[in-house]
Amino acid sequence: MTEKKWYPVIYMFLITAFFSAIVIGLTQATSKRVEANQTLIFETAILSVLPNVYDPNQKLSGIQMHSLFLEKVQPPDQQSAGAYTVTQNGNITAYALPLEGQGFWAEIKIVIGIADDKKTILGLAVYQQNETPGLGAEIAKPEFKNQFEGKIISEPPTLIDFARPGAPLNQSSVHAITGATQTSVRLEKIINDGLKKWQQEMQ
């Protein structure tokens, strides 16, 4: 039987089908968990840029984080122009605006917290990026993200300016990442394009 020409073909077909079935089964079994983890990462990013909602020093489980998100955060609507919100006595007290765009290597996804004055930035969270470790990936580090707290959204064309490292800053500028020009340029574009669109829709 082993001398027949069709035997190796049938054998390889059965082996391939067997291992393909295992891979497909594992993918289907874990897809819901992967989706749930992605949702939790996004919700955590939203909570982290909103004031007096989430204490990062608290050790909350995934279920507790999700419950906190559902309790405190309202989904986007026409009034918020795509931003998630927190309210008090029926009034919006803060916005969490998700933005995304092409980075140097892959898509970058962020959330910007904005105060009820629609001008003051409360914080920045980067919840998806695949930039170069030690260079562009520094956008996800606190040292970079913390720069945005308290910054004021300026007038067009540049609402938030990325200044060269070490340069003087004003109320609407932050330092770019040293040695990561392309990531900095692209993130600056994501932020400014997103904020411009949001302002237009809010008007």
Image (cartoon, helix red, strand yellow):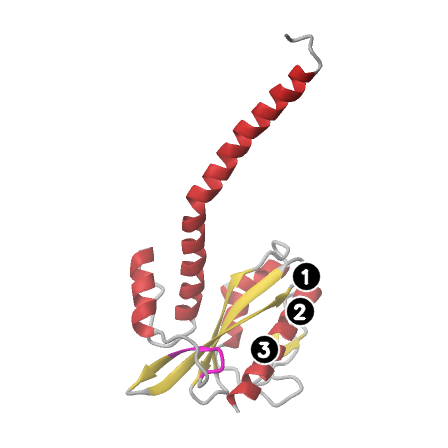
Secondary element under disc 3, as helix, strand or loop, is: helix
Q: Residue at the spot x=59%, y=64% of the render? A: 108
> How far, Cα to Cα, is label 1 from label 3?
18 Å
Give residue 186's mark.
2
Q: Quadrant of the N terminus?
A: top right
Residue under numbered circle 3:
194
Q: Does residue 160 appear left or right of residue 37 in this picture?
A: right
Q: Quadrant of residue 56?
A: bottom left
- Mark 2: secondary structure: helix
x and y, in percent, of residue 203 in the image: 53, 92
Q: What amino acid is at disc 1?
A: Phe
Q: Residues within 10 Å of mark 3 (few under 14, many from 20)?
A: some
C-beta proximity under 8 Å, tags 1 and 2: yes
Instruction: Tell me the amino acid under the disc marked 2.
Output: Arg
Could you give the CA–CA distance between mark 3 and mark 2, rounded to whole angstroms? 12 Å
- Label 1 residue SS: loop
Q: Earlier in the sequence, mark 1 or mark 2?
A: 1
Residue 8 lies, in percent from the top left, at 66, 17
The residue sitting at 61% across, 61% down in the picture is: 107
From the viewer's perspective, tell me whether residue 4 is left or right of residue 46: right
- Callout 2 environment at 10 Å: few (<14), some (14 to 19), or many (20+)? some
Neighbor class of circle 1 (other Cα within 10 Å; few <14, some 14-19, many 20+) is some
Q: Position of residue 85 (x, y in %)?
A: 40, 79
Q: Is residue 84 magenta?
A: yes
Magenta residues, as a range? 80-85
Give me the residue at 41% from left, 50% from top.
32
Q: Is residue 18 visible?
A: yes
The circle on residue 104 is 1
Query: Residue placed at 53% from the left, 62% from the top?
Result: 140
Amino acid at pointer 3 = Gly
Nearest to the observer: residue 100 or residue 49: 100
Please state the horizontal and vertical placement of residue 181, each as a whole percent of the image. Answer: 70, 66
